[in-house]
Each structure stands twice: as structure tokens, then as C-alpha cells.
């Protein structure tokens, strides 16, 4: 009798990787090559996709381009090379971009639940979510003292006072133009849609101080007594400042678009208008994720090498700009920047 053995379980996904713009744990992907299941696809300091086989404080990071993997894994499956080749072309590895793009490139995941933010990250985003949940709460509670969070509305379905719960949720359903039974789906969609906006907003906010420091340092280097004589270097510094500022501007334009769409939706409340805004937000996920991931690769690499104003002298910084940062920014510039998709409200 042949005994069938269960396939090996995929390694657990670390919360840090799950919440990151720049890392894709290959445990998410059904790869045939066992040795790759604990590896990660990452965006390095040049904003290039590589497979990180190991990372250790003493040994450093063992990175390898996808096309060189057969040298380390001679028996690597052709299907794995095909999947990894597609993954290395992605602009971002955040879960919201992955949800959309993995379907487009026909790369499956082991478990769809892996494409969710960690509970800790979701709690971090509560402060950002307030701006989006408050209009919804006001539709149910009004201006009373009962205002809390989105979970307060969900809790109405479990309220002991069934009549009270039905009255308040019935009012919301009427304003939306949906049945009472459709409210749970609406609440789930609403919460997940604006959790994604909150996630991207937090990423942008966390990058801003590093961006400010980098642009100030680039200005100082361009005015340096010796380095300032190198016209090519000065032009590179000015180009870096310009590209980073342009990317930040596009990102902020997207956030303004989301905010305007949300305000318009609540001024004329309906399920139809919400789903128009939701589609607008989803249609911008991949580009927004790519811009923030590229910006993160540039800025994180810089801050890791030069964590404060005293770390590294002008010439070491200039060397890093010439050898690393300029490649990251050129790769960032390659991200397509189509016009934002606006909601049809």
C-alpha cells in the first residue's frame, strides 16, 4: 500500500515582511524548489529585485539576481524560474499591489490570507482610519457621545437591543440604497478600502523626514568646495532632488484625489457612489505602491548608510550617490505615471 505524505508546510510569514513595501516572502508562492521557500524577493538599495537567500547581522544579506539562481539551485524547476521572473518585474511588494498584480500575471499564492496586514499594523493605522470612519459613524449615530470606531457599527449586529440595532442600521441601509442584509458586506468593503489608503498614507509619512534630510544633504554636497566643482556630480544631485520631489508630489496628488472622492461620496451617500470611489482607489494601488516602494528603497538605503548628519563625510556620501543612489532614482523614474483614475460620481 502506498502511503501519501502531506506536502511540507510553508514557513510562517513574519509580520515585518507582511507589512513591508519592499519584501515578498517566497513562502507565499507555491514554489517547487524547497530551498527557496525560506527566501525573500526584495527591492535592494538600487531599487532592483533580487532574491535574498539569507540575512544575518554578521554575515550580511545574501542577494542573488533571479537569472543567477540556477548556479545555486541546479535543479530549480522551470516553473519556479518563470514565476520568479514575473515577480522581479513588479514595482512593489505591498499586499495591496500584490492582490491586484498577482492575478494579472497569473502567479498564485499558497493562502490568500497571507495578503493581509498583520494585526499589529492594523492597530497602528487606527489613527489614520479615523478620518474615514467618522463620516460613516455620523451616519449611524449622529453627533452623540456614542461615536467610536467602525467596530461600533459592526457591533450593532450583535447588539442585545435588536430593535435599536435594526433601526440604526436600517437608516444607514436606506441612505445607501441597499438592503439591511447587504450592510455587513458594505462595512467590510468600506473598512478594507480605507485601510489600504491609511497604509499608504502612513508609509508616505514615515518616509518624509528621511526625504527632507536627503534633499538637504544633496544641496550641501552640491555646494561643497571641492565636489561643487564637478558639474556632472552637481547635475546628478539636482536631478535626484527633482525626481524625489516629483514622486512625492504625485503621491500627494493621489491622496488628495482619494480625499476629494470620499467627501463627494458622503455628500451624496449611496452604495453606487461608494463603489465608484472604491474602484478609483483600487485602480491607483499598483502605481501608488510602486512609487512608495521605489522611494522607500532610495531613502532606506541612504538612511541605513548615513543614519545621522555626522555619519560619513562628504566624499563618502558622494561616492554612495554615484554608485548606488543614482541607479535607484533612475529605476524609480522608470515607473509609469499615468493620469489618476477619478471616480464617476
Image (tube, rainbow, N blue to C red):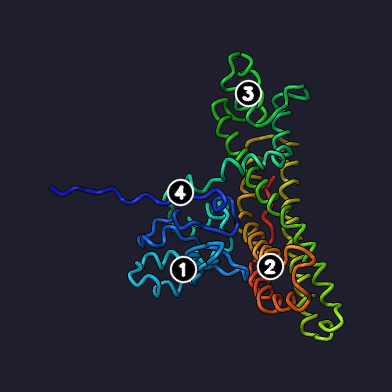
Q: Residues within 10 Å of mark 3 (few under 14, many from 20)?
A: many
Q: Position of residue 73 (x, y in %)?
A: 37, 70
Left or right, 78 with reference to 27:
left
Element class at badge 2: helix
Q: Which mark is residue 308?
A: none
Q: Which mark is residue 169?
A: 3
Q: Position of residue 251 (x, y in %)?
A: 72, 57
Residue appearing at x 73%, y 63% in the figure: 307
Residue appearing at x 48%, y 55% in the figure: 103
Mark nearer the N terminus (4 vs 2): 4
Residue 276, located in which quarter of the rendered image? top right
Q: Are marks 4 and 3 in contact (CB under 8 Å)?
A: no
Q: Nearer the viewer, mark 2 or mark 1?
A: 2
Q: Label 4 belongs to which residue?
A: 12
Left or right, 327 with reference to 317:
left
Q: Position of residue 340 (x, y in %)?
A: 69, 57
Q: Label 2 belongs to which residue?
A: 305
Q: Are marks 1 and 4 in contact (CB under 8 Å)?
A: no
Q: Label 1 belongs to which residue?
A: 85
The residues tagged by marks 1 and 4 sit, at their Cα atoms, a distance apart of: 23 Å
Element class at badge 1: helix
Amino acid at each position: 500500500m502506498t502511503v501519501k505524505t502531506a506536502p511540507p508546510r510553508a514557513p510562517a510569514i513574519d509580520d515585518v515582511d507582511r507589512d513591508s513595501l519592499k519584501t515578498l516572502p517566497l513562502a507565499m508562492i507555491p514554489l517547487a524548489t524547497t530551498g527557496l521557500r525560506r527566501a525573500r524577493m526584495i527591492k535592494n538599495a538600487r531599487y532592483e529585485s533580487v532574491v535574498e537567500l539569507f540575512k544575518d547581522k554578521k554575515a550580511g544579506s545574501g542577494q542573488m539576481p533571479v537569472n543567477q539562481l540556477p548556479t545555486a539551485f541546479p535543479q530549480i524547476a522551470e516553473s519556479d524560474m518563470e514565476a520568479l521572473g514575473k515577480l522581479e518585474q513588479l514595482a512593489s511588494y505591498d499586499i495591496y499591489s500584490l492582490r491586484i498584480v498577482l492575478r494579472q500575471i497569473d502567479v498564485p499564492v499558497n493562502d490568500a490570507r497571507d495578503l493581509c496586514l498583520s494585526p499589529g499594523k492594523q492597530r497602528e493605522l487606527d489613527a489614520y482610519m479615523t478620518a474615514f470612519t467618522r463620516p460613516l459613524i455620523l451616519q449611524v449615530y449622529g453627533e452623540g457621545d456614542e461615536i467610536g470606531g467602525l467596530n461600533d457599527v459592526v457591533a450593532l449586529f450583535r447588539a442585545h437591543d435588536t430593535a435599536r440595532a435594526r433601526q440604526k442600521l436600517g437608516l444607514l441601509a436606506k441612505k445607501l440604497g441597499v438592503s439591511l442584509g447587504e450592510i455587513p458586506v458594505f462595512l467590510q468593503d468600506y473598512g478594507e478600502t480605507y485601510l489600504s489608503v491609511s497604509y499608504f498614507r502612513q508609509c508616505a509619512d514615515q518616509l518624509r523626514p528621511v526625504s527632507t534630510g536627503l534633499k538637504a544633504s544633496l544641496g550641501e554636497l552640491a555646494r561643497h568646495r571641492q565636489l561643487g566643482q564637478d558639474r556632472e556630480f552637481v547635475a546628478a544631485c539636482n536631478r535626484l532632488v527633482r525626481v524625489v520631489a516629483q514622486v512625492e508630489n504625485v503621491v500627494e496628488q493621489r491622496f488628495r484625489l482619494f480625499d476629494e472622492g470620499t467627501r463627494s461620496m458622503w455628500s451624496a451617500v449611496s452604495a453606487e457612489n461608494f463603489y465608484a470611489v472604491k474602484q478609483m482607489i483600487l485602480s491607483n494601488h499598483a502605481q501608488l505602491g510602486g512609487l512608495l516602494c521605489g522611494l522607500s528603497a532610495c531613502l532606506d538605503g541612504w538612511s541605513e548608510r548615513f543614519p545621522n548628519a555626522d555619519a560619513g563625510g562628504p566624499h563618502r556620501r558622494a561616492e554612495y550617490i554615484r554608485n548606488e543612489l543614482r541607479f535607484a532614482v533612475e529605476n524609480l523614474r522608470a515607473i509609469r505615471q499615468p493620469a489618476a483614475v477619478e471616480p464617476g460620481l
